[in-house]
Image (cartoon, coloured by chain):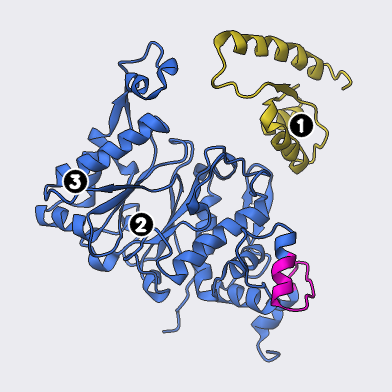
Chain colours: A yellow, B blue
Amino acid sequence: MHDAIIGEQLGLPSAGIMTSNFVSAAELMARALGAEGTRFVVIEHPISSASPEALAERARAAAVDCDAVLRGAPR
Amino acid sequence: MASDPTTIRTQAALRSKRYALDDVMAAQEFFHSRGWTDGLPVVPPTPQAVEACLEWVLMPPEQLLGIEPVRQRPITAEKLAVNAVMAGCLPMHFPVVVTAFSAMLQEPFLLHGATASTGGCAILIVVNGPIRQELGMSGGFNALGPSDRATTVIGRAIRLILYNLLDARPGEVDRSTLGHPGKFSYCVAEDEEHSTWRPLAEERGIPPQASAVTVLAAGAPRQIMNEWTTQPEEILDTVVAEIRANMRHYSIWPGNYALVLPPQLRAHFERAGWSKAEVRRYVAQNARIRRSEWAECGKGSVVGERGEREYAAFTDENDVLVVAAGGPAGGFGAVIPPWYGNKSRAVTLAIGACVDCAS
């Protein structure tokens, strides 16, 4: 989240991807960096024990959501 | 007080918000209700107590000790002093707190990662030099527990600073799944008086007789015991086995491991003429596993094609931090593993404040 926010501030279109259990941490980081409300993509937690198929499915969904974030689509 | 110009200067400059509370018990409830404590009682940080800490290190309240790198938060001496007082520190303890936190602010320490990670490490503080004796730090009995007042309150001060200056509270910035008891306080003084070995700080480049602090983002101590040999190699084989267990069960990545060795075990090294350098060399040469070993402990799914690849616990033998500490009897040692390999590096800093220049 930190990197995504800094990327945006540097003019690099960015979309952070969080797992569901880290949503509050991402929101806290956004507040801490003065970027409250920054949109990010949420995928199912956890990823470390996900099967390759499940991971691929999350990646596909995340790609769609990232596209929306990068295009600035409304929530 | 009015005749002391230094006191006037610093008192006038304190900028922390002040609260008027009825008594010390009201202060406890107030601090707890704000989430400013670790659950234990705190010493109310009165302006006078905070001033006394600042006076001791000859720092004005606004003295900038560093910038927290991720969120760009300035860390000032006043804010450290407030938390040090809360933790129970006397002014004489404050130089260690200042130096430890300054070390944590060094880039190689990776402060945000080390304090926010699900891995749940704590900040181990190793104190060397004459200041240990001035503060009554023992490094003897119960060395990794509450061995004495100074080690307890210094370690706790670091935790409260993380709470209150960096929001490293459970569920906020601190995302630890488990954490460990060292997160209350994790400080040890090396027992230099009962050791023929060079102190850790000196081994890491600090001049002899200078006081210094080494900080390490560390997991909980893993205790070992081997009272059935006098051979250095065999004692270290037990240590190595514990490091290998950590690599198998926790993290395979190389990093700074601290080894705490008590007098009963050190005596065997001293009789055999082994210095800390030889200890480090032996451990670094032998602490390694093959990735395929993960399959023996439930992690077969991530062995992949690299089963025969060997992983060393150390990329440099100087990454082994050997600390002489512990009570006089017992063949117990400890392996203190790194939080996350080389992501965070141990940092050693000399204690810069002159606490007794006049004598």
Residue drawn at the location 53% of the way across and 57% of the way down = B184
What residue is pinned by disc 1?
A: A9
Viewer-side residue, B311 vs B51: B311
Query: Residue under mark 3: which chain is it in?
Result: B
- Foreground tag (2 vs 3): 3
Displayed quadrant of residue B201: bottom left
Residue B171 in picture, x, y percent from top left:
66, 43
Quadrant placement of the N terminus of chain B: bottom right
Q: Are marks 2 and 1 in contact (CB under 8 Å)?
A: no
Q: Amino acid at mark 2?
A: Ala
Segment colored magenta: B13-30
Residue B289 shows up from this direction: yes
The local secondary structure at tag 1 comes to helix
What residue is pinned by disc 2?
A: B201
Q: Callout 1 environment at 10 Å: few (<14), some (14 to 19), or many (20+)?
A: few
Indicate yes or no whether the magenta region holds residue A21: no
Q: Amino acid at mark 3?
A: Ile
Query: Residue under mark 2: which chain is it in?
Result: B
The local secondary structure at tag 3 comes to helix
Looking at the picture, does residue B121 appear above or below residue B251? below
The local secondary structure at tag 2 comes to helix
